[in-house]
Amino acid sequence: MKPTGPHGARPNHAHLPQRMGVRVAGSGSSLPARRVTNADLEKVMETSDEWIVQRTGIRERRIHDHAAGESASLLATESVREALADARLAPTDLDLIVVATMTADSPTPSVSCVVAHRLGCGPVGAIDLNAACSGFVCSMNVVHGLLMSGAYRNAAVVGADCITRYMDFSTYGRGTSVLFGDAASAVILRVTDDASKGLLAQAMHSDGGGSRHLFIPSRAEHFPPGAEFEERKLNKVQMNGQAVFKFAVSTFPKLIEETLDKAGLTPEQVDHYVCHQSNMRILDAARERFGLSPEKLHVNIDRYGNTVAASVPLIFDELRRAGRVHDGHKVMFLAFGAGLTWASSLWQV
Ligand code: UT7
């Protein structure tokens, strides 16, 4: 029988190591099979490969096939399965699953509960977290705190979104729909007695006043004052691209500076900047501002577009699998998105 505390709960701190850290034990990703190139989009809307590449850096993206059963929960499940295999852990070793998503298959059950059930994790803690594109980065901060409290030992942190469900793939919606793609990606975080591993600094911010620049209306009253109601806009992402662009270009450098200041580090002392992939021009601006090489600030937007909460873990998983993330590296995760939200999480891995 498991030991119980005064209220019947397991005593969380009973077996805490003297020195404690959190390490990344594994990672994995899952992508829809269907690749959609810019040339494919040219067939369904007035756009061009040239416009999309020049303005965004995107060449292709993956789009889920709803009829084939692809959804945020399916992709999330497969990404955790792969991450567990990478960490050499069984589903029953997990005691917490946090899925960052804004496109759960339905309002309830949560994606995390579906993932836990499909993998056979048993009665694991399972919660979804919605901070749009910043969701995975916020989840890394939240889960680090929970692991360091001693309440949990092995957690899966997932970013999973099938945002193309909310896109208008016609000329009318071209300003938004060419940017996005679907994916899920996960990391396994474990408590370790190596206190050098884990979070060095973090930041989480929001500005609900900016929600009018990026929202999904499902009823007339969801349109902000001044926004024109149109039936065809219902359940489609509405984005003021230029406003979000300006917000991102000014916020990204400030977020990097704030996080470096908190950690007492210079830009060169961080080994990898793992940034939300929303527009090549936004990433280039951050690179130039801090004089970062492409080896430090990575890009995969050309292949996947903006995959919302999956964007940051997807590129991190690629880096790990390519053997580019080494023991002791400092990795800064960064994202911004709807809400508006922006967040960072700086780790020594
Ligand atoms: O996770 C956060 C998510 N969002 C973002 O990060 C988005 C940030 N914003 C952006 O990346 C850019 O604002 C966009 C890529 C969305 C748009 O680029 P832009 O340089 O701001 O273009 P624009 O919206 O000012 O449009 C310029 C022109 C317009 O034509 P006119 O009025 O100049 O004749 C648009 O109608 O480009 C036209 N246009 C297109 N043309 C071909 C807009 N979308 C397309 C398209 N293909 N897909």
Image (tube, rainbow, N blue to C red):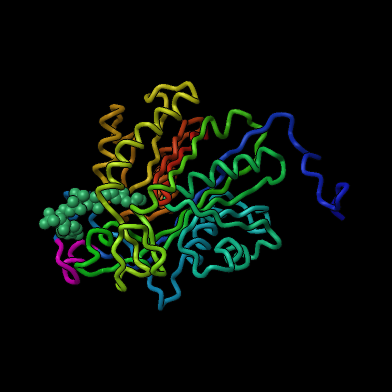
Quarter where residue 66 is shown? bottom left
Viewed as shown, does residue 12 lie left or right of 314? Answer: right
The foreground one among 313 and 210 is 210
Report x, y in % for residue 245: 28, 45
Residue 131, percent across and down? 48, 51
Residue 136, image x, y percentages: 48, 48
Q: Is residue 217 visible?
A: yes
Residue visible at 31% across and 47% down? 244
34, 306: nearer the viewer: 306
Residue at position x 19%, y 71% in the image: 44
Q: Is residue 318 visible?
A: no
Residue 42, position as x, y percentages in the image: 16, 66
Name above or below for residue 42 compared with residue 302: below
**Quadrant in which residue 15 is drawn:** top right
Residue at image location 44% in from the left, 53% down from the top: 132
For the magenta stretch, what is the residue range?
A: 37-47
- The reply, left or right, for residue 19 in relation to residue 49 is right
- Is residue 16 toward the left or the right of residue 250 in the image? right
Whether the magenta-drawn stretch holds residue 10 is answered as no
